[in-house]
């Protein structure tokens, strides 16, 4: 019998089955809430009904609140009303879970008196990843079921757990192999036959009693995760909510959870994290490339160069089950490159994160070669040789003669002009940039660089491929450093000037670290290696970096760069590097002075924002949010600050413009405000409107 357009009610013997079918994901919309409340009331009234089953059709169990309703006035029954009706039912309610029970979906399952699930189901409270706290009792009920330690782990990581784990920790009462509905009804009958009690999670206390005796568990958890949570507010707020579950009576705990939720949902960190969440999905879409653009099959991949990048790039495809041929110029380099790949896999297997037989399986997909001709039948060829335009042009000219007509020819260049590389071929429409980040098997970002000639199916194929290999692909235009490295170059420029003018590398790094970057600017340089892009034959002591390189100070790997490093690669400020900086400043006639933290912050970050604005204005990036995704996923911009363009909008563009003008007056035209910022301010707009 239909209760309303999304809710069905049926009675099987003693069990009322309430089925919701509200595609695509059974969000808890007004229709769903109304239908369920009506159906539950009916089941309560019908004397032959002894128990209830709540189940969903379609892809998944309830997906949580209906986000389209967030901006509209609340219509009763609210989600909390519905949860109250379920929890207060006088007949046992069994939630039957398939797909995912995340956020509001799990909170709903937690007010049922029993939970059964199919083995493929997953559940979790992912709110923390949007800078939020669950707002419908999740933080109060979860610890009562799984205990404080596991609840803390779940609410602060947001990571969904598999059904088996949920069953092991008592979150699911039974796993159902086969038909979920039949299994759930059988379970409900068992509850009735065995006269099992009607279990309201809110009344369960034994798990939290235990934590009451050990309040230090919270301090210990905070300490153990200090580094991971650094800068983020939401994990701390989730911890406080679980603390409230332990220290307060249930209703007061709920009120406390609500107030923590309200505070976080109004906080800029949550706005930033939600921005990143949506920006990531948006980035996958390329405006002028419709979804039905044909894509080319990519069954065989060639990689040229088995160095730092080539090896990591190859691993992405091996991981996805795609065979790779990797080409080097010398046997020794080939052996070294392939050896590193194997050792990488073996290390993963040793940590238990991969099966030993998978190491061989993946290595079995890899072929080494010294002959470019072996790439003749490849669908995609990615060049990762030295960053030298001439070398790359030669490689592409050869590829043009070797590769099959339909092959995609990609370069992993960091800065070079891909139009110029494409011009070395007779088929520039097939040439594209696939800019991976180091380590290429780990870093999520892939800048997909289209040139003026790249054909749309090639771009569409690259965007799809990014997903296949688990990357976040952002399509950008061709130009020096594309998006990410061009903005980095602006920060480089200011960081270099700041240390000559009087700041130390540690000063610059402290300010950026405190802003939320995982490491400072000069620490990052030392880690990457100061000799990347340095030519020992052409070096002329032209800047501090060259001088450090000439001294053999190439960074972490040589025990010294901008910092000194011990055997554990722990850094300390380097008197030697500081002397180099001071001497170079003197030679340049720069009088060193005290530089404030505020100046460091503004000059490094505003230079980045200004460069981002230019990139957007030139159409190299299609959207401000694409720039944000590149910097958040590729360069460690703190997620809770949303990316440079989002952050600038928060600062307020009029303030940004004023500050840029002041910096221009003090430090020259590199700070000349981007015309886009001037236009946006004149129109009262923000980057997000650009
Ligand atoms: N290292 C990074 O962090 C990083 C990040 C993104 C992009 N990139 C870019 O990736 C490319 C490779 O950088 P890398 O760090 O891996 O350099 P690398 O020096 O570690 O490796 C380059 C490899 O290419 C090989 N090689 C050179 N010419 C060749 C040819 N004609 N045929 C076959 N092999 C050849 C070399 O023997 C060497 O093993 C560069 O364009 C670089 O700008 C580097």
Image: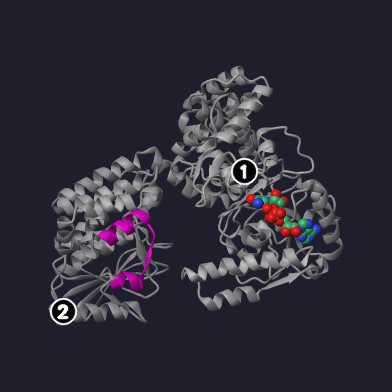
Magenta stretch encompasses residue 165: yes
689 or 463, nearer to the observer: 463
Question: Within 10 Å of the Cα at label 1, are there few (<14), some (14-19), or many (20+) other Cα atoms?
Answer: many
Q: Residue 661: x, y in percent?
A: 58, 20
Residue under the point 26% across and 55% down: 139
Q: Quadrant of the rendered structure where residue 315 is?
A: bottom right
Residue interval drawn in magenta? 149-168
Asked if residue 543 shows in the view, the reply is yes
Q: CA distance from mark 1 to mark 2?
A: 62 Å
Mark 2 is surrounded, within 10 Å at the Cα level, by few (under 14), some (14 to 19) or many (20 or more) other residues, namely some
Res. 484 mark: 1
Give the camera-side residue of 671 and 137: 671
Q: Disc 1 or disc 2, which is closer to the eye?
A: 1
Q: Which residue is mark 2?
A: 192
Q: Quadrant of the N terminus?
A: bottom left
Q: Residue at x 42, y 63 (%)?
A: 23
**Label 1 secondary element:** helix
Query: What colouring style does the render use?
Result: one colour
Observer-nearest of 273 and 662: 662
N-terminal-most mark, 1 or 2:
2
Image quadrant occupied by the C terminus: top right
Q: Quadrant of residue 467?
A: bottom right
Quarter of the rendered image showing ligand 1: bottom right
Whether residue 360 sits left or right of residue 401 in the image: it is left
Left or right: where 458 falls relative to 144:
right
Residue 205 shown left or right of residue 424 in the figure: left
Which label number is shown at residue 661? Answer: none
Which secondary structure is most common in the magenta stretch?
helix
Q: Which residue: 37% across, 58% down?
A: 27
At 50% from the left edge and 37% from the top edge, which residue is drawn? 646
Can you give x and y, in whole percent of width and height, for residue 189 in the image?
20, 80
Q: Secondary structure at mark 2?
A: helix
């Amino acid at each position: 019998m239909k209760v309303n357009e999304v809710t069905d009610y049926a009675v099987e013997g003693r069990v009322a089955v309430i089925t919701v079918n509200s595609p695509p994901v059974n969000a808890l919309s007004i229709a769903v809430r109304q239908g369920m409340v009506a159906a539950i009331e009916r089941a309560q009234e019908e004397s032959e009904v002894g128990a209830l089953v709540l189940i969903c059709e379609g892809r998944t169990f309830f997906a949580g609140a209906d986000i389209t309703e967030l901006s509209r006035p609340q219509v009763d029954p609210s989600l909390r009303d519905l949860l109250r009706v379920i929890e207060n039912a006088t007949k046992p309610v069994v939630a039957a879970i398939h797909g995912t029970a995340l956020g509001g979906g799990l909170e709903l399952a937690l007010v049922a008196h029993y939970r059964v699930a199919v083995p493929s189901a997953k559940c979790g409270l992912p709110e923390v990843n949007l800078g939020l706290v669950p707002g419908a009792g999740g933080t109060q009920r979860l610890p009562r079921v799984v205990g404080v330690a596991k609840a803390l782990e779940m609410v602060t990581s947001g990571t969904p757990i598999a059904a088996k784990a949920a069953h092991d920790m008592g979150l699911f009462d039974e796993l159902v192999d086969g038909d979920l509905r039949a299994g759930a009804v059988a379970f409900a009958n068992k509850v009735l036959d065995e006269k099992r009690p009607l279990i309201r999670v809110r009344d369960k206390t034994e798990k939290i009693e235990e934590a009451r005796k050990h309040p230090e568990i919270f301090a210990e958890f905070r300490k153990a995760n200090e580094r991971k949570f650094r800068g983020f507010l939401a994990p701390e707020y989730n911890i406080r909510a679980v603390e409230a579950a332990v220290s307060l009576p249930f209703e007061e705990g709920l009120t406390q959870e609500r107030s923590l939720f309200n505070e976080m949902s109004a906080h800029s960190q949550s706005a930033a994290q939600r921005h990143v969440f949506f920006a990531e999905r948006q980035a996958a879409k390329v405006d002028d490339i419709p979804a039905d653009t044909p894509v080319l099959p990519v069954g065989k991949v060639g990689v040229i160069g088995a160095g730092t990048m080539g090896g990591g790039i190859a691993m992405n495809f091996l991981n996805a089950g795609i065979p790779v041929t990797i080409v080097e110029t010398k046997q020794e380099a080939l052996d070294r490159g392939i050896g590193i790949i194997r050792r990488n896999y073996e290390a993963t297997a040793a940590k238990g994160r991969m099966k030993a037989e998978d190491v061989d399986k993946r290595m079995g997909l890899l072929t080494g070669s010294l002959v470019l001709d072996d790439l003749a039948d490849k669908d995609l060829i990615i060049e990762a040789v030295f960053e030298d335009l001439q070398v790359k042009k030669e490689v592409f000219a050869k590829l043009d003669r070797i590769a099959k007509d339909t092959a995609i020819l990609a370069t992993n260049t960091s800065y070079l002009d891909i139009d110029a590389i494409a011009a070395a071929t007779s088929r520039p429409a097939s040439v594209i940039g696939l800019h991976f980040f180091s380590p290429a098997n780990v870093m999520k970002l892939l800048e997909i660089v289209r040139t003026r000639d790249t054909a749309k199916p090639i771009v569409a194929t690259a965007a799809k491929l990014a997903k296949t290999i688990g990357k976040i692909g952002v399509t950008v235009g061709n130009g020096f450093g594309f998006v990410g490295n061009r903005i980095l170059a602006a920060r480089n420029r200011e960081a270099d000037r700041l240390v000559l003018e009087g700041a130390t590398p540690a000063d610059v790094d402290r300010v950026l670290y405190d802003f939320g970057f995982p490491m400072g600017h000069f620490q990052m340089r030392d880690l990457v290696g100061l000799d990347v892009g340095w030519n020992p034959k052409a070096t002329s002591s032209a800047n501090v970096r060259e001088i450090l390189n000439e001294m053999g100070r190439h960074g972490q790997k040589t025990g010294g760069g901008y910092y000194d490093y011990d055997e554990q690669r722990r850094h300390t400020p380097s008197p030697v590097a500081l002397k180099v900086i001071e001497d170079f400043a003197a030679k340049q006639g720069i009088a060193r002075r005290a530089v404030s933290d505020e100046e460091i912050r503004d000059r490094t970050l505003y230079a980045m924002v200004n460069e981002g604005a230019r990139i957007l204005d030139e159409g190299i990036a299609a959207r401000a949010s694409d720039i944000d995704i590149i910097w958040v996923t590729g360069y460690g911009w703190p997620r809770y600050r949303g990316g440079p363009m989002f952050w600038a909008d928060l600062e307020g563009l009029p303030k940004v413009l004023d500050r840029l003008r002041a910096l221009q007056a003090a430090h020259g035209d590199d700070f000349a405000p981007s015309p886009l910022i001037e236009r946006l301010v004149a129109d009262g707009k923000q980057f997000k409107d650009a």
